[in-house]
Image (spheres, helix red, strand yellow):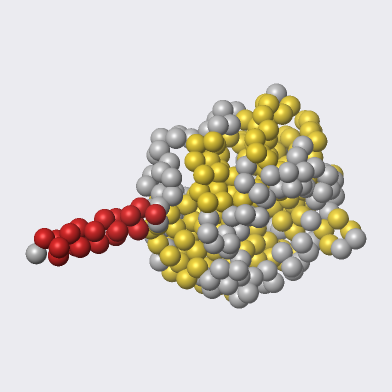
């Protein structure tokens, strides 16, 4: 009888150990952070405002991106993975698996509708889910939908390997409009209080893109271009300031909402992402495996992170 009790107790401990191994480091729900999503050796590194590492999540699967869902969850996805995984930050615990199929290019969370939007390059579809990963709607788009941005009940989607930007209703998932844009466009931002959508991009072949293109949101008409060589692909906005990274030229541009360049800084090696974090600008250098904390128009700190930082996630308490 004692032997049976011992075996049951041992099994119970083994199960507990197995459960705990399935968790990542917990992130205090009151902790502000900027997180580097690293793709060459998949991991997520969390930093505080002083550029101190507060947690490291080593990832066993080939995740290529992540998005914050609400204040206490993160969705991990991969282009070569058939499933996306939802984790709770405060516990590090796996919450839900979403069967996406292969080909996920991007995920976006809309706080107003509390929907997760996922684009897929294999099916050329946009799919919406609840915060808990329940499938809602699917709509067919064009070739390789990827960059997304929501504003005023409209979801703007760039079809990367096409010359079309799709405008979708976030409530009904109905297709509202389609605009002509250059192929290989990437990156979106809407300046505060303006009827404009800014579009960045890589360019194609031997003709790298050297401008941010500005369109009227009400009509889709192209209004003007802002020179930002080479390959402006990452945007971040705070108050009246828009930061843009051009990964072909390794340059960070900071501009006014009218497109006037205030200052610029050569930074990093092949930067793809920029984010405002508190009063600091953060840039991810993909090839030098580092993130840069920028204040007063200069690099304050350079911090090594995981290999291939490709996305930046920000949570401010």
Residue 196 % position (x, y)? 69, 48
x, y percent for residue 230: 84, 48
Quadrant in the picture for the N terminus: bottom left
The image shows a total of numbered marks equal to 0
Residue drawn at 44 percent across, 58 percent down: 86
Residue furthest to the top in view is 296
Where 155 falls versus 103 (above or below)? above
Q: Residue furthest left?
A: 1
Vertical order, 286 against 282 (above or below): below
- Percent position (x, y) of residue 10? 24, 59
132 or 142, which lies in front?
132
- Where is residue 164, by image quadrant? bottom right
Q: Could you tell whether 20 is left or right of 194 in the image?
A: left
Q: Look at the image and tell me whether residue 99 can be seen.
A: yes
- Which residue extends farthest right? 206
Q: Position of residue 221 (x, y in %)?
A: 75, 57
Residue depicted at 75% across the width and 58% down the height = 185
Relative to the observer, which residue lies in front, 216 or 140?
140
- Quadrant location of the C terminus? top left
5 left or right, relative to 17: left
User: Between 196 and 125, which is closer to the camera in this rendering?
Assistant: 125
- Residue 224, can we see it? no
Task: Tell me the residue at 41%/35% (across/down).
Answer: 30
Residue in view at x 62 percent, y 46 percent: 306
**Quarter of the image where one finds residue 268:** top right
Query: In the picture provided, is 311 more to the left or to the right than 13?
Result: right
Between 127 and 11, the one lying in front of the other is 11
């Amino acid at each position: 009888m004692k032997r049976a009790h011992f075996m049951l107790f041992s099994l119970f401990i083994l199960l507990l150990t197995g459960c705990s191994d399935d968790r990542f480091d917990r992130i205090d729900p009151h902790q502000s952070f900027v997180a580097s999503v690293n793709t060459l050796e998949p991991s997520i590194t969390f930093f505080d405002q002083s550029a101190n590492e507060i947690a490291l999540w080593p990832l066993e699967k080939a995740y290529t991106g992540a998005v914050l869902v609400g204040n206490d969850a993160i969705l991990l996805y991969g282009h070569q993975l058939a499933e996306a995984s939802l984790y709770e930050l405060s516990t590090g615990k796996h919450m839900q698996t979403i069967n996406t199929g292969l080909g996920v290019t991007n995920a976006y969370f809309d706080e107003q509708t509390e929907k997760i939007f996922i684009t897929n390059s294999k099916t050329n579809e946009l799919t919406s889910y609840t915060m808990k990963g329940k499938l809602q709607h699917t709509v067919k788009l064009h070739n390789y939908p990827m960059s997304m941005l929501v504003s005023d009940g409209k979801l703007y989607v760039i079809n990367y390997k096409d010359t079309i930007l799709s405008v979708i209703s976030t409530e009904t998932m109905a297709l509202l409009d389609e605009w002509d844009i250059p192929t290989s466009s990437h990156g979106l931002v809407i300046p505060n209080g303006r009827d404009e959508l800014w579009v960045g991009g890589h360019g194609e072949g031997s003709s790298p893109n050297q401008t941010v293109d500005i369109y009227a949101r009400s009509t889709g008409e192209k209004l003007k271009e802002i020179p930002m060589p080479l390959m402006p692909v990452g945007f971040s906005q705070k108050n009246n300031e828009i930061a843009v990274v051009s990964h072909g030229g390794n340059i960070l541009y900071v501009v006014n909402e009218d497109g006037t360049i205030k200052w610029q800084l050569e930074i990093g090696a092949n930067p793809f992402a920029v984010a405002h974090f508190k009063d600091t600008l953060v840039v991810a250098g993909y090839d030098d495996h580092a993130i840069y904390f920028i204040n007063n128009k200069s690099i304050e700190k350079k911090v090594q992170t995981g290999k291939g930082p490709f996305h930046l996630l920000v949570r401010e308490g």
